[in-house]
Image (tube, rainbow, N blue to C red):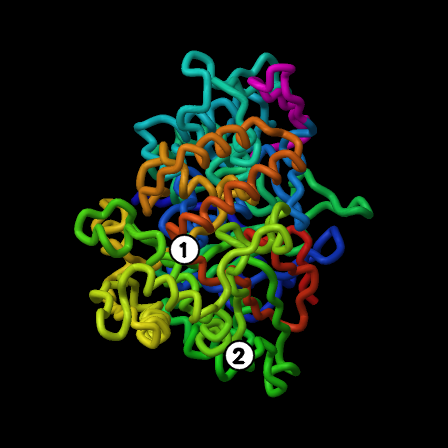
Amino acid sequence: MMKFKLKLNRCFLGAVALVTSTIGCAVTEQHSSTIFRYNESAGISSLDPAFARNQANMWPVHQLFSTLVEYDSALTIRPLLAKKWIFSADKKKIIFTLRNDVYFHNDPCFLNGQGKKLVAQDVVFSLQRLMDKSTASPGAWIFSDKLDPVTPFSAPDDTTFIIHLIRPDITVLSSLSMPYCSIIPKEAIDYYKSEFRAHPVGTGPFSFVSWDESEALILHKNNRYFERDATGLRLPYLNGIKVSFLSSKTAEFLAFQQQQLDFVNDPDASLKDELISKKGVLRAAWMQQFHMQTGPYLNTEYLGFLLHDSSQPSLLNNVKIRKAINFGIDKKKLIFYLRNSMGTAANSGFSPIGLPSFDSNSVRGYTYNPDSAIQLLHECGFDANHPMPEITLTTVPNYAAMGSFIANELKSLGIHVKVDVVQKSLLSEQMSKGEVSFFRGSWIADFPDAINFFSVFYSKNPSPPNYTHFSNPTFDQLYEKALFTYDDIGRFALYRQMEQIIIDQAPVVPLWYDKIWQLFQKNLSGIASNPLNMLELRKVYKK
């Protein structure tokens, strides 16, 4: 690996060395003299936004880079690098007007080390690079079969950027908010080449300082960041970020308890009974030490059935069996005892609480009803004298207890389930190849629109995301119509019809809609959860 040396302010280096200390340098703006410290137990594999495929990579990428648009806390899409956008009359062009006051971070890749002004050609370069097969980005699918093959992007001038679509598609604008679509300078790619993963250059609120993959990632406040708060003060308030890489979640919490970390996301499951009650409330013994916040997380945990599986044609291919399993699991009890109420029973279909289109009054899924489950089994010819053959549920170690709970629930109905626990990588491979007939899965939103969840069931999508191999012509027609329905009322009505088809055909058992669970020190303010679980630090203030 190439090594790059930067000249750093001596006071800042001292703050980095002593995790619990604050920067002692004089600052010119209010609230800007502190470092935010969090741990990433999974480690970071790349700081290149083209490889921001998981939360571990997304969080630092979000601090270093900016996208054309973003979602606010209310999940309303708003401009960021773009000042505004309009659709052409045929909805096949999205025309963006860019800000004229955005600069890339200072870096040796630029002339005299001074970050250049962002222009529309940088946007063209960034998105073309994302699509380029030689980049091998896992985010290349975002624009698959959506863009004009001859001229996908254009930049008529420095502040105008245009996306050219094959057909109208509501998802393209939302996709531009994803970290994959962060804007980068060509100069940095030319200068650092493959080392760009470890030497990122963006326009975000924080700039890169150093990254020791076994020790820590250090970021510094970007003093030329373009956003300001309501009073005119330049963001961010923090002076820097330190990310440590303790692999043990237990050690992470200990460091947090000792105030060596400012924030913990999703504490280790082994700690949940000590920290929170079965009702999901922080226990009194901890209330004086730190704050806890929860909120909707756009993630649905579910069980999936491989449809048209020749190995079990009379069992899981039978919709009545799938419905019986849906009726036969007490989701509320599962969440209460195994998750200390960190989740909501998924009784309203597949798309979760937190989405603007979510409507529990209009969409009624499956609630616990053992009598209905037994009746469906009887209709299939199964009872105490004619038991149903054993089926296998494949899950991963973190969800082994959940698998045992579900097996016990279904056993009381006459459905015998063997739980097969395998490593996550193996299960992902088996699901992709269609080698497991009954499996545990989860779907986390790429962007906050239910169409992203329905993509899991669109028959023209491969596996992933269509792990169940679900195929329904009516569903496909509604899905395609929703792609070019731009008014929310009309699109949400289509979503309700799609959700009902999923409920009626039962290719999955939605178990729970997830919750964010975060702890933070009492000297922090401005830190707020959001349904995408993106770490947002621009307006965080540390006393």
Q: Quadrant of residue 214?
A: bottom left
Give the position of the N terminus as an image quadrant: top left
Q: Is residue 43 visible?
A: no
Neighbor class of circle 2 (other Cα within 10 Å; few <14, some 14-19, many 20+) is few
- Secondary structure, mark 2, is loop
Q: Which residue is mark 2?
A: 258
- Secondary structure, mark 1, is strand
Q: Nearer the viewer, residue 496 or 100?
A: 496
In the image, 396: left or right of 59? left
Amino acid type of the residue tagged 1 in the rendering = Ser
Q: Quadrant of residue 378?
A: bottom left
Which region of the structure is painted magenta? Answer: 85-104
- Is 30 covered by the magenta stretch? no
Q: Is residue 231 above or below residue 158?
A: below
Q: From the top left corner, tell me how far across and down residue 481 is, in percent.
A: 53, 28
Q: From the top left corner, tell me how far across and down residue 400 is, in percent.
A: 31, 71
Judge depth for marks 2 and 1 and give the one in front.
1
Amino acid type of the residue tagged 2 in the rendering = Gln
Neighbor class of circle 1 (other Cα within 10 Å; few <14, some 14-19, many 20+) is some
Q: Which residue is mark 1?
A: 442
